[in-house]
Structures are given as C-alpha cells and as structure tokens.
C-alpha cells in the first residue's frame, strides 16, 4: 500500500468530531485558548520559526457573492500576506480555488525588502483546489482530505502555526480542528455580533449616533411597518435603506424611495403597494422575490438614508489581539459608487484630517465593547459623516467582523515601510518618521482591459514606471491581477508622500492603462 494512502487511512481512522457538533466547538475553543501563549512567545520575535496558513476564502452568501464580477480572484487580495516572508524563518502556505499565475507570485516577491526571491520561495508553498465553482474555498478544502494532508506536510516540524482567514465561519472552524491549529480571527460563535442589527445595538450602547431606524426585522411585513413608522416620525424623509443582516460591500442592501407618496393617502397601504417597484436592490441581478427570501432567512434592518450636501463614508479598522489588547490600525475615507451609491469602490488613507482622530476614538470604543464580548481579530466600523455648520456629525453604520477591502492596502504599506498608524494624531509614519498616504481601489475597471494577461500587465507597468520604489517609498502596486484578462478588472494601491501625490499616481496609472489597452 502506498505511503500516502496509509497516511490518509490513518487520518480517516482517527475519530474526528462531527462538523458543527458541540464536541467540535469545545475542541475549537481549546485550540483557540492555546493561541495567546503562542502569540506572546512567537509573534514579537521576527526570527522565530513559524508558519502561517492563509485561507483567503470569502465564506459569505454565495448567491450574493456571485453578483461580484471575478469574485474567485478576490482570493488574491490576501497575497499581501506574502510580505510575511520578509521574516527569514517564517513559512507561508497559501491555498486558493484555482492556481495563481507564477508571474503574479513573482510580482509580490520582488517587493520584499531585504530578502531575495530565492530565499522567500524556499519558505512559500502554494496549493490549489483546482475548482472554480461558486462554493467557498474553505468548503472546497474540506472536500479534499488529500489537500488537507498536504497542508499539514507543508508545515516544518517544530514551527508554531496559525491560520489567517478572510472571515471565520463554521467551515473555517471545522478546518481549524482538522489541522489542530488556531485561527487569528473571530470565533464564529461571536460572528453575529457584527451583523447589521447587533451593530446598531452595540453602537447605541457605546453612545454613538446611528441613523433613525429599526433592527431585528424578519420579513416583508416588518419591513413595511418599519418604513411606515420612519415616514410617520420623519415626514420629510426622502428614502430609507433596507439591509440584510449579513450582506457585504453593499450587495445585501436596497434603497426604498418615498417619492410619489401623498400626504392624503394611507402611508402604510401606499408603501405596501409600492414596495416592489420603489425598492432598488443593489445586487442588480437579484430579483425582488429573491431579495425578500434572503432577507427572511437572514433578518435585517431598515434605517434612514442619511442626507447631506457634503457627505463622506469613513471607516475605522481595528484589531483585537489574542491577549485582548485593542488597537486602531487605520482609518479610511471610502469611495462608494454604483447606481445606489452603496458599493465599495476604493479608499483614501488616512481619513480626512478633520475627523480621523475622532472616528478613531469611536472605533476604539467599539473594539473595547467587542473585546468584552469575546471577539478577536481584525474588523472595521463604517460611518457616514455629514458636514454641518459647527463640524462633522458621524453616524455609525455597520461592523464588519472580518478582513475587507482596506485590509490588504494597509498591510502592504506597513510591511513595505515598517511603519505604523498613530490614531492619536491621525497620521501614518514610516520607520524613519515620514508621513505616507495612499489611494486604493478594487474596481479599476474597463472593457478595454479585457484580454490583458498578467505578463502583459507586468510589461506595461515596467515600461511605464508603474511600480513601487523602495528608495522613495512611493509608487504603484497592483492586485486582483488574475481578474484582468477575463473581467477587465484590477486592484491598485498608490502610495505617496502627500495625498495629492498618491492620487496622481492613480490618475497616471489609469492614463497609461487606457492608452495601452485601447
């Protein structure tokens, strides 16, 4: 019998808890309880022997996720964590649904400061499921016991190891137990603390402003009642937002317009009769019937659409480490777009100087409240901010207990400059105390870009000086490169010594691509 078959049979004979069982949950908690000791001993030591298993699975509602073009390539966003290889005894195991072009891996490795490509490659293992289906990556891994065994074998003996995931659900928990390895992320038992309803409750507990609205709604009738009560309480209201509890990037949202409502009519009856026609669903391919079906399965909220002549969408990114320490790691001004103005398009870092410090303090309040409820890992708090005569008024909108669209740009900046964000003064300082800013986007998109392969993009970038310069610590970095040829879609991070320089790098990048791909 081949040795590999013997190993698989031995693993099969080992009694494993049923997925989702209390036995598995208790075993996962035991594994997680061992993490603080590893964190305290290994993480501060850049020369410590350790392994990071990166699972970039976007384990969210697959039907809604399927509305995001090129979503399977979003697994490439965590390639920023290849920067961990700058630590010379750190091993990285990176798993994806489909193989990533070696040209893309080479692109990231050339960014590594102080480490040769050869040295980094000795410590990098890329594994793939060879499965482009809509099922989440983690589910694909769980369906492949031989792949799980390859993950185990990729970890050098004696290395401390943990999993880094985009988000943590019951599937990541099952994989953690199978690998006997902790996850640097939120226990799925606490995941609902970040849903739309519980976010609103927590914000109010922290004394933050929230838009007028209602949480814990369960069905179409309760949506109608909430929309009616909002209009009765605020007659001048023009529109409201309906959000599924577990929607993301705006794709679980819909905008309801009160346009055409007559004061002389029964408002509840009017809303009931016009709900399907007046509700604009962000996920364009999702029908009204499907939206309501999903809302009923998830639950959700209705809240006022925040109006304002000058309005921004800042966010605060925080981290709760395994020791329970809370930290604000970045602030951003998000760009939202699409017909509904609800879809994340990109961001400026840091947030505007008028309020970066203030929203950082709000984010820290939320982090401390979540930590008391057992939450660990990275998360973000989104706001809508309106400029008034005496300053800015901030409305807390939602918590995302996971990595997000602003995670990878900041990780790239931090690893490349060895700096940190100081939330007390709202600035990012490099190791030599210089300020840095960036503009980033996941949606640099054009039909003209279709057919441009990864080698083509790298050639265009090199010929037009679209690259990151380690000497000046400024320049351009690409991500989502694998999505370019099929979807005409690309991500970019543009770092500059001033906000204007960062934006200029972006504008130059667009100009070059449009010129090269006409």
Image (cartoon, grey):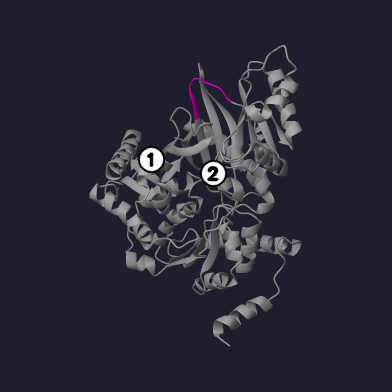
Total marks drawn? 2
Mark 1 vs 2, N-terminal side: 2
Answer whether residue 199 is visible to the viewer in this image: no
Would you place residue 270 above or below residue 334 in this image? Answer: above
Q: Main secondary structure of the magenta part?
A: loop
Q: Where is residue 497 in the image (x, y as percent from the top left)?
A: 32, 39
Front residue of 74/11: it is 74
The residue that appears at 53% across and 67% down in the rendered structure is: 160
The residue that appears at 24% across and 47% down in the rendered structure is: 464
Answer whether residue 161 is visible to the viewer in this image: yes
Front residue of 309/257: it is 257
Q: Where is residue 197 in the image (x, y as percent from the top left)?
A: 68, 37
Q: Mark 2: which secondary structure?
A: strand
- Which residue is the site of mark 1? 438
- Which residue is the site of mark 2? 318
Instruction: Give the image quarter of residue 210.
Output: top right
> In the visual, does 314 lie left or right of 280?
left
**Image mark for residue 493:** none
> Which residue is at the far top?
264
- State which region is magenta: 306-312
Classify mark 2: residues with Cα within 10 Å, few (<14), some (14-19) or many (20+). Answer: many
Q: What separation in Å lies between label 1 and label 2 (alpha carbons)?
A: 18 Å
- Quadrant containing the C terminus is top left
Q: Is residue 53 magenta?
A: no
Q: Position of residue 395 (x, y in %)?
A: 58, 29
Q: Mark 1: which secondary structure?
A: strand
The residue that appears at 72% across and 68% down in the rendered structure is: 17
- Quadrant containing the N terminus is bottom right
The residue that appears at 66% across and 25% down in the rendered structure is: 212
């Amino acid at each position: 019998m081949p040795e590999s078959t013997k190993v698989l049979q031995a693993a099969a004979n080992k009694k494993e808890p049923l997925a989702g069982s209390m036995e598995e949950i208790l075993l996962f908690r035991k594994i997680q309880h061992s993490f603080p000791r590893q964190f305290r001993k290994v993480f501060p030591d850049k020369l410590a022997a350790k392994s990071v298993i990166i699972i970039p699975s976007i384990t969210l509602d697959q039907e809604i996720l399927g509305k995001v073009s090129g979503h399977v390539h979003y697994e490439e966003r965590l390639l920023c964590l290849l920067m961990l290889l700058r630590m010379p005894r750190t091993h990285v195991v990176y798993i994806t649904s489909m193989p990533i072009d070696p040209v893309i891996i080479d692109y990231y490795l050339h960014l590594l400061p102080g480490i040769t490509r050869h040295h980094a490659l000795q410590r990098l293992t890329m594994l793939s499921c060879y499965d482009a289906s809509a099922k989440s990556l983690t589910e694909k891994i769980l369906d492949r016991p031989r792949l799980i065994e390859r993950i185990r074998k990729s970890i050098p003996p004696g290395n401390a190891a943990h999993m880094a995931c985009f988000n943590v659900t019951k599937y990541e928990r099952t994989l953690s137990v199978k690998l006997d390895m902790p996850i640097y992320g939120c226990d799925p038992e606490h995941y609902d603390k970040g849903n739309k309803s519980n976010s609103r409750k927590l914000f109010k507990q922290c004394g933050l402003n929230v838009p007028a609205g209602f949480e814990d709604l369960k069905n179409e009738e309760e949506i109608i009642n909430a929309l009616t009560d909002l209009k009765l309480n605020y007659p001048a209201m023009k529109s409201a937002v309906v959000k599924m509890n577990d929607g993301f990037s705006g794709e679980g949202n819909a905008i309801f317009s009160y346009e055409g409502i007559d004061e002389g009519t029964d408002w509840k009856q009017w809303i009931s009769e016009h709900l399907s026609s007046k509700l604009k669903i962000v996920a364009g391919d999702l029908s009204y019937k499907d939206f309501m079906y999903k809302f009923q399965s998830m639950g959700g909220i209705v809240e006022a659409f925040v109006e304002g002549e000058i309005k921004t969408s800042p966010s605060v990114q925080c981290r709760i480490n395994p020791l329970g320490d809370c930290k604000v790691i970045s602030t951003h001004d998000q760009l939202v777009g699409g017909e509904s103005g609800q879809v994340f398009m990109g961001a400026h870092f840091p947030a505007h100087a008028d309020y970066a410090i203030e929203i950082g303090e709000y984010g820290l309040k939320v982090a401390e409240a979540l930590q008391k409820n057992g939450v660990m890992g990275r998360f973000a708090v989104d706001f809508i901010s309106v400029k008034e005569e005496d300053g800015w008024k901030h409305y807390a909108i939602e918590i995302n207990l996971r990595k997000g669209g602003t995670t990878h740009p900041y990780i790239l900046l931090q690893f490349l400059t060895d700096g940190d964000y100081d939330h007390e003064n709202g600035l990012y300082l490099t190791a030599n105390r210089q300020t840095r800013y960036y503009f980033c986007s996941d949606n640099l998109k054009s039909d003209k870009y279709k057919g441009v392969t990864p080698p083509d993009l790298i050639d265009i970038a090199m010929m037009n000086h679209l690259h990151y310069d380690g000497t000046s610590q400024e320049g351009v970095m690409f991500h989502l490169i694998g999505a370019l040829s099929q979807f005409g879609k690309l991500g970019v991070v543009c770092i500059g010594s001033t906000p204007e320089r960062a934006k200029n790098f972006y504008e130059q990048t667009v100009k070059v691509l449009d010129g090269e791909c006409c």
